[in-house]
Every structure is written in C-alpha cells, then in structure tokens.
Image (cartoon, coloured by chain):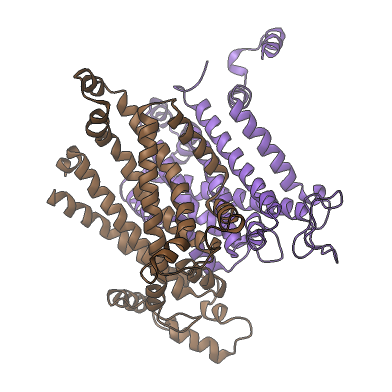
C-alpha cells in the first residue's frame, strides 16, 4: 500500500507543475499588451506603466515564472487589481462559506446517490429504479440553478419556510445557519445525487448478475448480507471514480448556486473578478480549486486501492 | 412502419451496398427509436426558432414598449413583457439563438482541436503522445466551468469570448476519445493494407481511420453541445455571458430570480433551455444506441 501511495503521489507532480504553469500563462494569453488592456481605455501612460510594474510584466518571462513559483511556495498569490488586497487573504475570507456549502452538498450527494443507486440496482425495474431514472431525466432538463430558483420560489417565497437568501455562519447561530444553508445545499446535493445514483445503479445491477452473487444467495445468506458484503464492495469502483469527479461539479456548482441564494463566497469573488478582469484573483482562485481537485482525485485513486486489493498489488 | 416496408419493397431493387450508410443510420436513430424521434423533432423546432429568430420573433428583443412593463401573456406579447418593457418571447428566441451559435462554435472548435490532437497523439505515439496527453491531463485537472470562467477574464466578457472560452475548455475530452479510437484502429488490417499501398500518414489518419473512429465522436459531439449550452446558460446567469442588453437564456433566468412573484418569467426561458438540453441528450442516446451493435434492435 505504501508503494502504491508513493507512486500515485509522484505521478501527480507533473500535473501540479503543468497546471500552475497554465494558470501563470493566463495573464500572457491576453491578446495585445496585457498592461494597457487591463488598465482600460482611458488610462494614462503612467497608469499603464504602473500596472506593468505591479504585475512584473517588464521583467523577463523566466524571472516572472520563477518569482511566481517562489511566491506560491510562500502562499503568496499576488495582490488583487480590484481591491488591492492580497489574493490569498480574499480567498481565505471567502472560501469558508463556499467550503461549508460544498461539504454539506457533497454529503447529501453521497448519501442519497449511493442509497438510491443501490436500491435501484439491486431490484432493476422496481419503483426505486423508476424513481432514479425519472430523476435523472428531470435533472438533465433542469440545470441546478433553475432547480435552485424553483426551490427558492416554492419553499422560501411561497411557503415562507426558509429565508430567501444570505448566509449566517453555522457556528454563530446553528439554527439560522442551517436554515440559510438548507436550500442551496439541497439544490446542489440532489442534482449531483441523481447522477451518482444512476452510475451506482448500473454498477450494482451488473455486479448483481455475477455468478458469485447467485452463489452467495444459494448459500442462504440474507439479502442484506449479500448486498452489503458481496455486491457493494465490487460495485464501488465506478462510484468512487464518479464521486471524485463530482467534487469538481460541486465546486463549480457552488459558484453558480451561491448567486441563486445571494450567498457570499468564492462564487461572488470569481464573478466580480471576471467583470473587472482582475486576473491575479482569478489565477489565485483557479489555483486553489485545481489543487483541491487534484488532491481529491488522488484520494479517490487511493480509495481504489483500499476497496480493490488487485489495484494496490499491481503497484 | 409497415407502410414504409411496402414502399421499400416496391422501389426498384437497389444493390444493398449503394444504399447510403448515412440514410440507414439516420433511420435507425430517428425513425426506429421514439426517444430519438422526439429529440430530433424538438431540436429541429428549436434550431429553426433560434437561428430564424430575426424572422420568427414578433418584436425586436431590445425594443422597450413604454408603459407596458411586466405584462402577462397577451396576443400582442405572447409571453408578456419583462421589467424593462421588452417582449419576453422575442428575447427568449434571441437567447436561444445566442445559445445555439455559442454551442455550435464551441463544439466545432473543440472537435477541430481535440480530434486532430487525439488522432495525432494516438498515431504518432512516443514523445508526441506523451506531451499531448500530459497537456490533456492538465486541462482536465481544472473543473470545467471554472477554466472557462478564467479564460473569460482573459478575453473579456462577451458572446465571442464565451464561445472561444468554452471551445478551449471542450477539446481535451475529444482528444482522449479520438486517441483511444486511434489506438484501437491503427493496428487493424485495413490500416496495414493502406500503408502497404504506400498511403501517407496524413492520408491514413484523416481518410481511413478518422471515418472509422467517427461513431463515438458523434455521440460525444451531441453531449459536448449539451455541455456548452448548459455552460453558456450558467455564465449568462452569473452575468458574465452576453453583454446586457443582449439576451441569453441564462440572463433571462437571472432576471426572473429577482421577480419571484411572476413565475412565468422563470418558467418560459427555463423551459426553452430545458427542452434544448433534453433534445440534445435524447439524440445522443439514440445515436449511441444506433451505433452500438449490442443495443441495436433488429
């Protein structure tokens, strides 16, 4: 197992380096002279020059790159154009509400997705199966932000059961906090749960048809033991793969869902930064999200090894 | 169905090989599969309505009718008017048009870059393959929409930037698929035969293998288009898609969010978007079924 982890860690290094290189080069993808475009049309020569210097664009590109990497090692992502504050500080402040939303949504996804997927997969063409198929079709046609507004309209606006939007930190006031978190987390969680349930259903129904499952049943094991001990473990690989990828969907989803429910968070930072073409902030947020995503995929790969001994022995 | 069979039998006997592959496949996708038929009809209606928006729309999407703010549906304004007294139906048609143009361009760009890179990587192997695939891995390490948002910041907000940003985000998926197809095809006998006949690599890749690697790529195209439609709507919803006052389905939905007391403002653009996404997915499924010999119903 140790060798397997080590190998996976080493394999992810080039991707981390290339990803940071890609993020670095974003600034240089700007057509024409980045400094004068970022300064805007009415900027004076001095202003353009100031921007050029603050971004270090007047130095050789290799120096810029090494400085950028050295900065990263010290958790320095540069300063925001828009607010003038260090990007890392803006991320630290705004990451918390997003993280809170993402963690709760993801828990909902895993719980509902795996539960419904297994129920539907064990008994194909049952009511469970129908429910999973129908909700998949429902969520193909109804994007998460539309579903969010529908929930907002039904539960918060018409029934008045929950607040329309905003955020209260859960640790300041748990009840009010959960109330503001409920709808956004449910929106994001259920849309992803439908996808996960569909995948889990397919995997489980395929495993259920295998002969060793028939054997287990023939031995007289209860259905519960057959499913929990024999079916589930072998059908988990595709589920783990997808749930790893779903972290990305949850992260991007929260950017959009935060707007539906007027929640503060990285979503608002991203949108404001795009409008202001605040490249350093965008670069910072991108880097953080990529790092999280690479880490999650690494964890998913390690989980394969835990679930399936064949995978860790190959290493 | 039986009528058609009779028709076919009466038609002058055509050698089987001459019957075009395109026609038989289309028949399999659209006529024999109710889901495929639904998808195809829906998509045709939406494409005609969207691309034909300048002809179909009853009003200019930007024209403001003084004193006619937030009206309900009527004969003059089919879906009513928005907060700035503009005709909602016309705005939806133009939004659909923007969505179509963006998704077609983005998918086209994705296919162009992605498939060429994938075919080259799979055929060349070695260092070329490694370089291209590491780049693909890196691109795929970015959560989809986020990368496009980053590119949008670089290009500046606007419909052209959205199309470009989504296209640049779409290619790695096509590269993976095309490379896989290439690896599966390149040691086949017909490729060896073509090489033995002295065909150039370029000819073998683009004239022989590309054609055979097509089916999964077509499915991927339909799915990539659905992804682009969804991404364009999300960006529009975030307010970083089209530049106001130009409509997009996403921005119309965002407008509706501020007026929950008038649910039709939400339902109309959401339905257009939903049907668009659904039709693309249905069609992708039908194509997949038709191409997959195991699932084909004879």
Q: Quadrant of residue A148?
A: bottom right
User: Observer-nearest residue: B125 or B113?
Assistant: B113
- Name the quarter where the C terminus of chain A is drawn: top left
Q: Note whether residue B119 is visible.
A: no
Chain ID, brown in image: A
Chain ID, purple in image: B
User: Observer-nearest residue: B160 or A303?
Assistant: A303
Q: Quadrant of residue A32?
A: bottom right
Question: Is A282 situated above or below B45?
Answer: below
Residue at x 66%, y 53% (from the top left corner): B266
Q: Note whether residue A51 is visible.
A: yes
In the displayed structure image, the side of residue B45 where residue B199 appears, left or right: left
Question: Is B274 situated above or below B62?
Answer: above
Spot occupied by residue B274 in the image (x, y as percentages of width and height): 61, 45
Spot occupied by residue B159 in the image (x, y as percentages of width and height): 63, 61
Q: Quadrant of residue B143?
A: bottom left
In the displayed structure image, the side of residue B163 where residue B178 appears, left or right: left
In the displayed structure image, the side of residue B177 where residue B47 appears, left or right: right
User: Observer-nearest residue: B167 or B144?
Assistant: B144
Image mark count: 0
Spot occupied by residue A138 in the image (x, y as percentages of width and height): 54, 41
Spot occupied by residue B247 in the image (x, y as percentages of width and height): 70, 59
Residue at x 50%, y 40% (from the top left corner): B220
Q: Residue furthest left?
A: A2
User: Observer-nearest residue: B196 or B246?
Assistant: B246
């Amino acid at each position: 197992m140790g060798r397997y982890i080590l190998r996976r860690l080493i394999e992810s290094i080039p991707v981390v380096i290339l990803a940071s290189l890609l993020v670095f080069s974003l600034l240089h993808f700007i057509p024409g002279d980045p400094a004068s475009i970022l300064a805007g049309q009415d900027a004076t020569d001095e202003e353009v020059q100031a921007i050029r210097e603050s971004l270090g664009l007047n130095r050789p590109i290799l120096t810029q790159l090494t400085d950028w990497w050295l900065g990263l090692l010290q958790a320095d992502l540069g300063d925001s154009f828009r607010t003038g504050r260090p990007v890392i500080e803006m991320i630290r402040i705004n990451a918390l509400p997003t993280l809170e939303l993402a963690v709760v949504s993801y828990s909902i996804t895993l719980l509902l997705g795996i539960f419904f997927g297994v129920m539907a997969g064990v008994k194909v063409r049952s009511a469970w199966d129908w429910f999973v198929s129908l909700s998949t079709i429902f969520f193909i046609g109804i994007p998460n932000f539309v579903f969010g507004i529908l929930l907002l309209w039904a539960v918060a606006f018409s029934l008045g059961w929950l607040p329309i939007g905003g955020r209260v930190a859960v640790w300041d006031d748990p009840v009010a906090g959960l109330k503001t978190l409920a709808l956004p987390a449910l929106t994001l969680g259920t849309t992803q749960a439908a996808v996960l349930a569909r995948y889990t259903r397919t995997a489980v129904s395929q495993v259920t048809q295998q002969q060793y499952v028939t054997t287990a049943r023939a031995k007289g094991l209860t259905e519960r033991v057959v499913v929990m001990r024999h079916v589930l473990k072998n059908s988990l690989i595709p589920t783990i793969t997808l749930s790893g990828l779903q972290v990305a969907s949850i992260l991007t989803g929260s950017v959009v869902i935060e707007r539906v429910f007027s929640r503060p968070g990285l979503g608002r930072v991203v949108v404001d930064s795009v409008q202001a073409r605040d490249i350093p902030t965008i670069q910072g947020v991108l880097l953080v999200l990529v790092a999280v995503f690479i880490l999650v995929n690494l964890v998913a790969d390690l989980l394969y090894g835990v679930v399936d001994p064949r995978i860790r022995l190959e290493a | 169905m039986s009528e058609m069979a009779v028709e076919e039998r009466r038609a002058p006997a055509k050698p089987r090989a001459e019957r075009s592959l395109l026609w038989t496949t289309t028949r399999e996708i659209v006529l024999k599969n109710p889901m495929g038929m639904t998808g195809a009809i829906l998509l045709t209606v939406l494409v005609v309505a969207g691309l034909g928006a300048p002809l179909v729309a009853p009003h200019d999407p930007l024209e403001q009718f003084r004193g006619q703010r937030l009206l309900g549906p009527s004969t003059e304004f089919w879906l009513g008017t928005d907060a700035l007294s503009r005709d909602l139906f016309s705005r939806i048609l133009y939004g659909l048009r923007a969505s179509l143009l963006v998704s077609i361009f983005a998918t086209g760009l994705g296919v162009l870059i992605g498939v060429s890179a994938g075919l080259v990587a799979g055929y060349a192997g070695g260092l070329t393959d490694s370089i291209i695939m590491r780049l693909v891995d890196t691109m795929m390490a970015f959560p989809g929409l986020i990368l496009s948002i980053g590119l949008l910041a670089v290009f500046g907000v606007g419909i052209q930037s959205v199309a470009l940003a989504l296209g640049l985000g779409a290619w790695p998926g096509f590269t993976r698929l095309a490379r896989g197809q290439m690896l599966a095809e390149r040691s086949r006998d017909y490729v060896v035969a073509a090489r033995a006949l002295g065909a150039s690599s370029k000819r073998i890749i683009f004239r022989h293998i590309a054609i055979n690697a097509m089916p999964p790529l077509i499915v991927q195209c339909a799915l990539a288009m659905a992804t682009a439609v969804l991404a364009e709507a999300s960006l529009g919803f975030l307010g970083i898609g089209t530049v106001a006052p130009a409509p997009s389905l996403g921005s119309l939905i965002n407008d509706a969010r501020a007026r929950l007391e008038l649910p039709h403002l939400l339902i109309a653009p959401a339905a257009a978007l939903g049907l668009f996404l659904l039709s693309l997915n249905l069609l992708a499924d039908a194509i997949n079924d038709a191409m997959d010999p195991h699932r084909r119903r004879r």
